[in-house]
Amino acid sequence: MEILLIILYIIFGISVFGLFWTYAGYPIFIWFLSKIIKKEHKYDENYQPNVSIIIPCYNEEKVIEKKLKNILELNYPKEKIEIIIVDDGSKDNLLKITENFIKENKLQNISIIRQERSGKGQAINNGIKMAKYEIVAISDANAWLDKNALKYCVRYYADKNVGYVVERNIYEIRTTTGVNIGESFYAKFDFFLHKKESQIGNFSQYGGGWLQTFRKILINPNHNWTLAEDFEIPLVVIQKRYKTIFEPLAKGYKFSMVSTQDLFTREKRMITGTIQIFFRYLNFLNFFRYGLFSLMFFSHKILQIITAFFIFLMFISSVGIYFLSSHNLFYVFVLLESVALFFCFAVIAISKVKDITIQPFPAIKFFTLTNISCLIAWIDYVGGKNYGTTWETIRSSREIEK
């Protein structure tokens, strides 16, 4: 009995520390470290290399014309840009709209690749194979770029040791819902971490389909991507010992989701991809090889996908300790944890009847739904469920007009 009690105390302690470190300890630590260590990333404002921009598409008829106009309006020499649209077996009018746009505007720098439905990873690979230039950019069809975004990113490539530069991802709220207000809140938290991480080192693990740029020679065009391609790209570059940089002045925008179902669809895919990345890149946990980045990788990404287990184990161990020891303190812990869990699920239940958009309710809803998605993703992964390589378009984040 005493051994079981000791084990429960250990589980409880690890769970509490895991939750604390993920959402308070690590952010405080990285903020404090950024005050002590400040690395300047050098760039050449006049450096403007040729760039191949890859736009992976699946059923993007609603946004593709605006996307192409957005790219052509960038504050960057048009003669130094080529646009490669990779159609992943779309079933809508994507190709027709794109071809008409090219013809009407007499454009020579846009190419179209048609592939069988095989996913974003294969679309990235096919785009890289066709790309003519050393610097490659990937940008989702539903992402709108600030006019200086590309210029701000590529200026760092004057340094031959830089292999990857990414901009800041921003969610725009078109229709206010609890889901997108909660998403926006956590996006700001994520931005804070990435900004501080970038300030103290040459390794940024920031990824997203808004705009990612990298040296073509660093990415194998036959790479077998996980479901989290956007997150994996900087890791591939870091593994080859090149610098990866987060540039907050370069900004990209997407409409945030408005529905719970869209959140589940996206989060399950992203979390499953992150689980795949965790097991594929275990070598990043080698502190002696990767130094501080090992801590960043573990604290910022890996711990977030096991938060649900910390919550579950903290509750179960608290109950076990109370029944085995009758300790009054753990009675209080069990009571507080029960109330917190009830409150979280009550917020979700109430939001089905009436959406709540006043903080902290959206943040609580987003946190709860994300961790439920996380548990489902882990169960599916352990059970061997195959999500395939294809992706579905999140309709609520696609609109023609802002």
Image (tube, grey):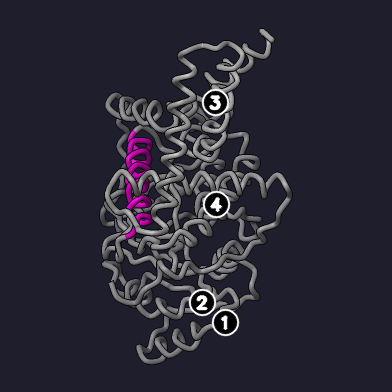
Residue 218: give its label.
Answer: 4
Q: Residue at x 39, y 63 (%)?
A: 258
Q: Nearer the viewer, residue 60 or 116?
A: 60
Q: Nearer the viewer, residue 339 or 143?
A: 339
**Mark 1 highlights which residue?**
91
Which tag, 1 or 4, sits closer to the chain's start? 1
Q: Which residues are magenta?
A: 177-199
Instruction: Tell me which amino acid carries mark 1.
Output: Lys
Determine if residue 134 is in view: no
Q: Determine crowd level at label 2: few under 14, some 14-19, many 20+ residues with C-alpha closer than 10 A.
A: many
Q: Position of residue 117 (x, y in %)?
A: 64, 73
Instruction: Tell me which amino acid carries mark 2.
Output: Asn
Q: Marks 3/4: CA distance?
A: 23 Å
Which tag, 3 or 2, sits closer to the chain's start? 2
Instruction: Tell me which amino acid carries mark 4.
Output: Leu
Q: Determine crowd level at label 4: few under 14, some 14-19, many 20+ residues with C-alpha closer than 10 A.
A: some
Is there a contact, CB below 8 Å, between mark 3 and mark 4? no
Of the two numbered discs 3 and 4 in the rendering, the one whose residue sits closer to the viewer: 3
**Mark 3 highlights which residue?**
287
Task: Classify the position of the C terminus by image quarter.
Answer: bottom left
Q: Secondary structure at mark 2?
A: loop
Of the two numbered discs 1 and 3 in the rendering, the one whose residue sits closer to the viewer: 1
Residue 194: give its label.
Answer: none
Q: Determine crowd level at label 1: few under 14, some 14-19, many 20+ residues with C-alpha closer than 10 A.
A: few
Q: Determine crowd level at label 3: few under 14, some 14-19, many 20+ residues with C-alpha closer than 10 A.
A: few
Q: Nearer the viewer, residue 228 or 52?
A: 228
